[in-house]
Image (spheres, rainbow, N blue to C red):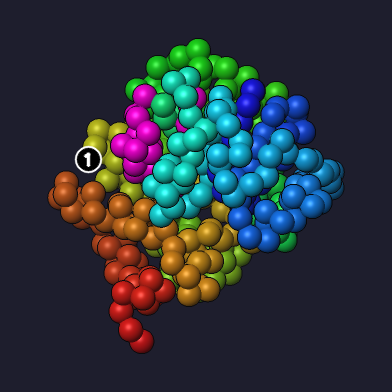
Amino acid sequence: MKIAIFGIGAIGGYIAGRLTKAGEEVSLISRGETLNVIRNSGLTIHNDNKNYTVTPKHITDNPEEIGIVDTIIICVKADAVEIASEMIKPLINENTIIVQTQNGLTASQKIGQILGKEKVLEGICHFGAQVISPGVVRGMANSPRLTIAETNNDKTQRLLSLQSTLNNAGFNAVIPESFQVDQWAKLMAVSALGSIGAITRSNSPIWRQIPSVVEMWIKNMEETRDVAKSLNIDVPYQEIQDRIDNLPQGVGSTSMHRDIADGKPSEIEHQIGSIVRIAKENNVTIPVNSFIYNALLPLEKLARGEISA
């Protein structure tokens, strides 16, 4: 399969490394130092003490150099989805599919508005990865789980073909009965972990030692589940219990938390911000989420230059 991956950070780099190692024809769209390192030395993956370096078919900042591909996986942050969608137009013909992997709820809609909603497959990454240095990525799972789906939850041939390709590369590619339930479960988990980390200025190994903060984290997830219910999306409570039982004892932070801590623009509007807005539209009371969102908002607006210090 001819695959292009746009955005070679932690997630994009890890997906690219596994697919290339499995023998797929993978082209990468990146920029800056990451582009230069991979062009000169290849893409290096560290996973469970098994390190390997792969050479993609193309590594470029100009998609026109790649040509038409079968599948495009967009691995940029939510704010950059529209820019990425415009840039990948030279890679697309009538049969090309586009897989979004962004946190939040709106990426596939934005891609579809630019490139055609019939081309878009939904995707959720349930694994962690870390950029060690430009062009060097560490994976955090031996069998990383990916949820993929058609927006209408049909099990089409193109979806099954992509599942087979991903599984052949060592992923655990899952097609759920309801993508929307999985999407809200992921949003519930990543938004709660990121927002509690950002508001407490600490990773989960620290704040998990304080029962009242753990209670706030659980309440955060319960509120998000209530918001999903207002849209007739029933996230099983077991999803919350699973997070409680497996609260990270390692690093325990998210990119949103790290970006806010570093004074960078974050995905706050695509995560807890979207939860707060939908709750307001549907008259759902969510005091924990609302407080955290508004408490973090000044830092976000400062980072974006929308207010001054």
Quadrant including the C terminus: bottom left
Residue in the foreground of this view, choosing between 136 and 172: 136
- Where 9 falls versus 144 (above or below)? below
Q: Name the residue under label 1.
A: 230
Residue at 63 percent across and 26 percent down: it is: 2
Residue in the foreground of this view, choosing between 6 and 286: 6
Determine crowd level at label 1: few under 14, some 14-19, many 20+ residues with C-alpha closer than 10 A: some
Q: Residue 217 location, x and y as percent?
A: 43, 59
Tell me, yes or no, if residue 263 can be seen here: yes
Residue at 69 percent across and 29 percent down: it is: 25
Amino acid found under the numbered disc labelled 1? Ser
Q: Residue 203 location, x and y as percent?
A: 57, 66
- Where 53 falls versus 262 (above or below)? above
Residue in the foreground of this view, choosing between 96 and 154: 96
Tell me, yes or no, if residue 136 can be seen here: no
Number of marks drawn: 1
Residue 228: within the magenta?
A: no
Residue at 27 percent across and 46 percent down: it is: 227
Which secondary structure, mark 1? Answer: helix
> Left or right of 181: which side holds 140?
right
- Where 219 falls versus 121 (above or below)? below
> Left or right of 106: which side holds 159?
right
Q: Give the range drawn in magenta.
A: 96-118
> Left or right of 302: which side holds 230?
left
Q: Residue 301 location, x and y as percent?
A: 34, 73
Residue in the foreground of this view, choosing between 259 and 241: 259
Residue at 56 percent across and 24 percent down: it is: 70
Q: Residue 152 location, x and y as percent?
A: 34, 22
Residue 111: within the magenta?
A: yes
